[in-house]
Amino acid sequence: MAHATKHRHAVEGGYARGEETRARIVTAALKMFGERGFDGASTRDIAAGAGVNAPALQYYFDTKEGVYLACVEHIGKRVWEYLSDVIAYAERALAENADDAELIEAFCAIQERHADFLFTSETNDWGLFMARLQSGDGPRAGFEFIYNHVSSRIANVLSTIVGRLLGRPADDEETLIRTMTLSGQLHVFQSARRSVLARLNWDRIDEGRLDLLRSIIREHTGALLRTMVKARDSGTPVRGNTAA
């Protein structure tokens, strides 16, 4: 994966300490940027949260934007570490012209791994940061890095699967919308977590509840994708005849 920003590295015996200091700064910055936004988070407060002095941020990251981009890079790296094997499996299935059942399984496997990732404890501190990034807060370079190096590759694989099952191009508007609505089943449980928990009378999403969530999303996704296959094979549009 490409890097969003260039980091300085400590020399000789100080390397491990330097990496640990950078990690503390990124952890503190993720929390601070999430709570206060890019403009509201000061380098002084980030440094205090990391237990370092303010010049340390300039040494390791040059500027506040450098700290922000390091946060984005950290998230992108962790997402890719978690999803890369299921994405690679889906890409191979597409390249080898796998049958419909295998493509549906590949799509569901990506969704399930994404669910696992979203509800790990590490990602709990990223919710506000990512919500602000998606809303336009922070340097545009942060969004562009996540989009170009992580989101677009995942989205391209998913839309290519849906396009194959629909019998439509991967970049067709209908294909893209159907892909996004299938993927969106999961996001409400993260973006509206407080409302979801209240509605379900849950205090958290533990492993048992995550199993239930995964199984229902798999059921929904599988049913919808199989409907697309039937429509493709019968020559009937999924939406039916909308002509007047």
Image: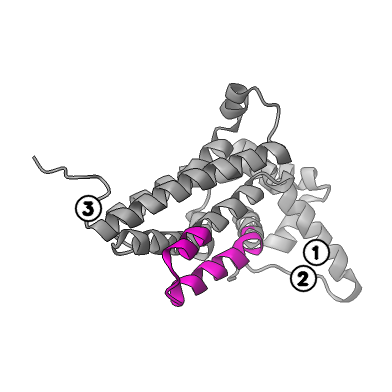
Q: Residues within 10 Å of mark 2 (few under 14, many from 20)?
A: some
Residue drawn where x is 66% and y is 42% of the image: 211
- Residue nearest the observer in this picture, 2 or 81: 81
Q: Would residue 206 appear left or right of 72 to someone viewing this image? A: right
Name the residue: 38% across, 58% down. 162
Prevailing secondary structure class for the magenta stretch in the rendered image:
helix
Q: Position of residue 213 (x, y in %)?
A: 60, 40
Q: Does 75 appear above or below 130? A: below
Q: Looking at numbered disc 2 in the image, what kind of residue is underneath it?
A: His
Asked whether residue 205 appears in the rendered view, the answer is: yes
Residue type at tag 1: Glu
Identify the residue position indicated by label 3 in the image. Answer: 236
**Label 1: which residue?**
19
Query: What is the spatial separation of the Cα atoms under label 2 and label 1, in whole angstroms?
Result: 7 Å
Q: Label 2 belongs to which residue? A: 9
Mark with earlier residue (1, 3): 1
